[in-house]
Amino acid sequence: TTRLDGKTVFVTAAGQGIGRATALAFAEAGATVHATDINEALLAALPNIGNLTTARLDVLGDAAIGSFVEKAGAIDILFNCAGFVHAGSILDMKDSDLEFALELNVKSMVRTIRAVLPGMLARKDGAIINMSSVASSIKGVPNRFAYSLTKAAVIGLTKSVAADYVTQGIRCNAICPGTVESPSLQDRMKAQGDYETAKATFIARQPMGRLGTPEEIADLAIYLAGATYTTGQAYAIDGGWAL
Ligand code: NAD
């Protein structure tokens, strides 16, 4: 297993789901972890671990990200996990939903990467991991227009950053999960009305016949943080959905 002793990690959306599991896994691997989220109550519920500190951070705010990074000091690993799933096709979608999806799912990553890159470049070492999805340029998924558009953009920005800084010690990769057990997935299932049918439908998308766990995604994030010969890749982790 990858050890990350001596490394400092900045995680967005660490309050629940994949971000939470990954922040805890980074701490377990020995890293110093800055677990951030917009929701302070969720951060307060994280276990008390010596090498993990929490901070409220809204990834929609450029100035807040800048001052957070300045205070945090050297950051070796950035895990951009914040994102929101809008339901609906192109005709269902409100312009305001697309604007919001672009802000939260894409521009948040532009902001955090811009804030941490100068420090990484000065040390000629940095790993950036961006949360995409198989619902992106990998696979067309019904009723996920705004979401898939933004998650495809995440793959594009990942490859672009990887290409620009590949000779300067920076790696940038994307994680593309299928359907993963999380609080927001539970909300999406409940929102469909018939919870049991919705759950069965979500499970059936994966040929493996089950949902992924946040811990399985966290394992991939830890791997990518230490995988020194890969950059610019979109890693599907989806129970075979995109086969
Ligand atoms: P989730 O959706 O249950 O939780 C999202 C977290 O983001 C919450 O803790 C929330 O407080 C935080 N957040 C919301 N707005 C924020 C903001 N402006 N600034 C900072 N934090 C904010 O978690 P999840 O389902 O594990 O999803 C995490 C990421 O993984 C998202 O980018 C999502 O698109 C992606 N993803 C999830 C799945 C899945 O099936 N769960 C599949 C593919 C990709």
Image (spheres, grey):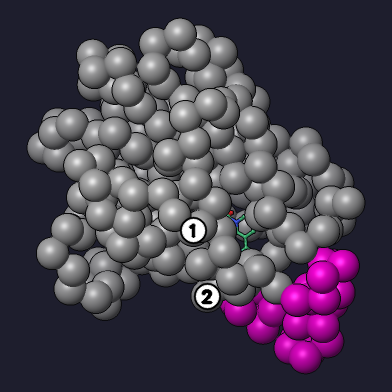
| Position of the N terminus by quadrant | bottom left
Question: Which labelled disc corresponds to residue 183?
Answer: 2
Some atom of ligand 1 lies within 8 Å of the CB belonging to the residue at label 2 = yes
Tell which of 127 and 145 is nearer to you.
Answer: 127
**Magenta residues, dominant SS class:** helix
Residue under numbered circle 1: 218
Some atom of ligand 1 lies within 8 Å of the CB belonging to the residue at label 1 = no
Residue under the point 13% across and 33% down? 73
Q: Is residue 95 visible?
A: no
- Give the secondary structure at mark 2: helix
Tell which of 83 and 18 is nearer to you.
Answer: 18
Residue 228 location (% of width, % of height): 47, 29
Tell which of 240 and 2 is nearer to you.
Answer: 2
Residue under the point 31% across and 46% down? 4
Compared to 97, does 239 lie above or below? below
| Count of number-bearing discs | 2
Q: Is residue 215 visible?
A: yes
Left or right: 150 as drawn, with respect to 164: right
- Give the secondary structure at mark 1: helix
Residue stretch in magenta? 186-210
Question: What is the distance, in whole Å, between disc 1 and disc 2 at their CAs?
Answer: 16 Å
Residue 100 location (% of width, % of height): 54, 45
Compared to 120, does 227 lie above or below? below
- Residue 200 magenta-drawn? yes
How many other residues sit within 10 Å of disc 1, few (<14), some (14-19) or many (≥20)?
A: many
